[in-house]
């Protein structure tokens, strides 16, 4: 196909091309389509494939025209890719298509291509690696969290207090002063699940009692129409449960795991917190270094990749369709940074031959299996089924890339 391609935009990752297909090629495609219809068409009074060509063309004119356009555009698109040596990364867009009998078929092709990431500067950056110190208060907080996880809830017959779980029926008056229908709620008092006035009302009752009084809605209430309003509120307290946490003694330590004493548990907790502090410090150093690398080596990123990432996160977080445009607007900068980060890592890995091989992945899974005390083959099959092999490959590659960057950019 002897097409004519006129570039209209070639900078960055976007390509905007004006494409023109000669009349002869359009006619040839139209003839091929018409012959196929003539060979297959069933018209009353004629055997299949025996109807006059002119009659077939007239009866199926719209279908022949549409299929001709689709065939010509498809062939022209493939010719453009070859002629311009393009590697599109997403579905192209066709604009301003023009198809008039006896004239060339023309259209505007908009396509995004893989960005050219040169990374001319990868050294000379200064990034501090700061490890957050782990103190006694951090250990106390972690132990308290373990304790809280093993707390039990028991019913009480007295008035509830902050921290208690309650089952309560609530109702309020409307603007006309009419009391609404009681609705049941399960709340943890002090957790911000109800406004302060409602919680105070609930804490005036004992289980089985109904109380009511006027409650003022806060001035910063999420529903603007309700802000500052005063309403009569009614609460029927059905039950109260209070948390009972175990004592922090050696028996608790043995319940948590293979620890004879609380001192042994605290030692392990402290070591674990320090390990995670090191991991967090590495992650923060990597992020800060990449920000400097990206700032020193600007490049465009394809909108299609950013949009795909935003869409993926919206699905993962279960964002309702009506809220997705707002989510996309807020999340887009983060998604764009992620795309840039991935491209930098991928480019360095390719240039310096740091990408993980199948043998590297096998060795990593073998190491994981030994650490877990399980069979390597079974673990590999499980990871493959869960689609996590790519994740392991990416992690090995990233670790190598950042080790390489660390040699070029010693930590401050």
Image: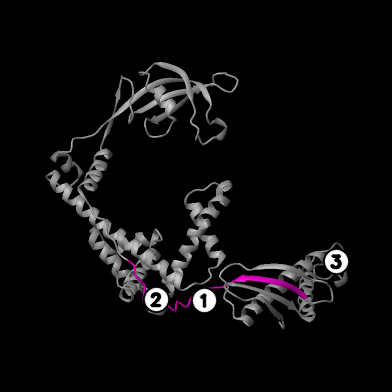
Label 2, on which residue?
A: 122
Image quarter (top left, top right, bottom left or bottom right) of the C terminus: bottom left
Question: Height in image: 248 above or below 400?
Answer: above
Image quarter (top left, top right, bottom left or bottom right) of the N terminus: bottom right
Task: Specify which label sits upstream in the sequence, 2 or 3.
Answer: 3
Residues under labels 1 and 3: Cα distance? 60 Å
Pair 1/3: label in front: 1
Q: Report whether residue 378 is seen.
A: no
Q: Residue 344: give x, y in percent of width and height.
A: 44, 71
**Left or right: 32, with 405 as reference point:** right
Pair 2/3: label in front: 2
The secondary structure that dominates the magenta segment is loop
Q: Report whether residue 366 is seen.
A: yes
Question: Height in image: 113 above or below 205?
Answer: below
Q: Is residue 110 found inside the magenta-colored segment of the image?
A: yes
| SS under mark 3 | loop
- What residue is shown at x 49% (from left), y 72% (from top)? 298
Pair 1/2: label in front: 2
Residues under labels 1 and 2: Cα distance? 16 Å
Q: Residue 371: give x, y in percent of width and height.
A: 23, 60
- Which disc, if any, is residue 116? 1
Label 3, on which residue?
A: 46
Task: Specify which label sits upstream in the sequence, 1 or 2.
Answer: 1
Which region shows up in magenta?
105-127
Q: Residue 301: give x, y in percent of width and height.
A: 53, 68
């Amino acid at each position: 196909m002897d097409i004519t391609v006129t570039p209209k935009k070639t900078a960055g990752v976007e390509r905007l091309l004006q494409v023109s297909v000669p009349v002869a090629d359009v006619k040839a495609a139209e003839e091929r389509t018409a012959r196929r219809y003539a060979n297959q068409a069933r018209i009353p009074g004629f055997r299949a494939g025996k109807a006059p060509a002119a009659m077939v063309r007239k009866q199926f004119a719209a279908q022949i025209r549409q299929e001709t356009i689709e065939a010509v555009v498809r062939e022209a698109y493939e010719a453009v890719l070859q002629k311009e040596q393009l590697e599109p990364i997403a579905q192209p867009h066709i604009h301003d298509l023009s198809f008039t009998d006896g004239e060339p078929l023309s259209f505007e092709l908009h396509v995004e291509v893989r960005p050219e990431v040169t990374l001319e500067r990868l050294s000379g950056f200064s990034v501090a690696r700061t490890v957050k110190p782990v103190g006694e208060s951090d250990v106390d907080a972690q132990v308290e969290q373990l304790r809280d996880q093993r707390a039990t809830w028991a019913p009480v017959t007295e008035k509830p207090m902050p921290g208690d779980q309650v089952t309560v029926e609530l109702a309020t008056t409307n603007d006309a002063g009419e009391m609404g229908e009681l609705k049941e709620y399960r709340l943890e008092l002090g957790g911000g699940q109800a406004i302060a006035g409602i919680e105070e009302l609930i804490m005036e009752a004992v289980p089985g009692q109904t109380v009511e009084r006027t409650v003022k809605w806060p001035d910063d209430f999420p529903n603007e129409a309700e802000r500052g309003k005063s309403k009569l509120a009614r609460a029927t307290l059905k039950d109260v449960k209070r948390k009972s946490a175990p004592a922090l003694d050696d028996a608790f330590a043995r319940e948590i795991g293979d620890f004879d004493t609380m001192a042994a548990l605290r030692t392990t907790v402290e070591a674990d917190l320090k390990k995670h502090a090191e991991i967090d410090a590495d992650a923060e150093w990597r992020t800060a270094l990449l920000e400097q690398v990206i700032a020193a080596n600007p490049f465009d990123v394809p909108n299609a990749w950013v949009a795909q990432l935003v869409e993926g996160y919206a699905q993962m977080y279960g964002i309702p369709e009506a809220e997705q445009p707002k989510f996309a607007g807020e999340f887009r900068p983060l998604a764009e940074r992620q795309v840039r980060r991935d491209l930098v890592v991928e480019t360095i890995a390719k240039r310096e031959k740091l990408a993980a091989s199948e043998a590297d992945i096998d060795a990593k899974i073998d190491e994981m299996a030994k650490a877990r005390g399980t069979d390597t083959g079974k673990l590999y099959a499980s990871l493959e089924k869960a689609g996590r092999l790519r994740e392991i490959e990416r992690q090995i590659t990233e670790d190598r890339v950042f080790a390489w960057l660390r040699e070029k950019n010693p930590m401050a």
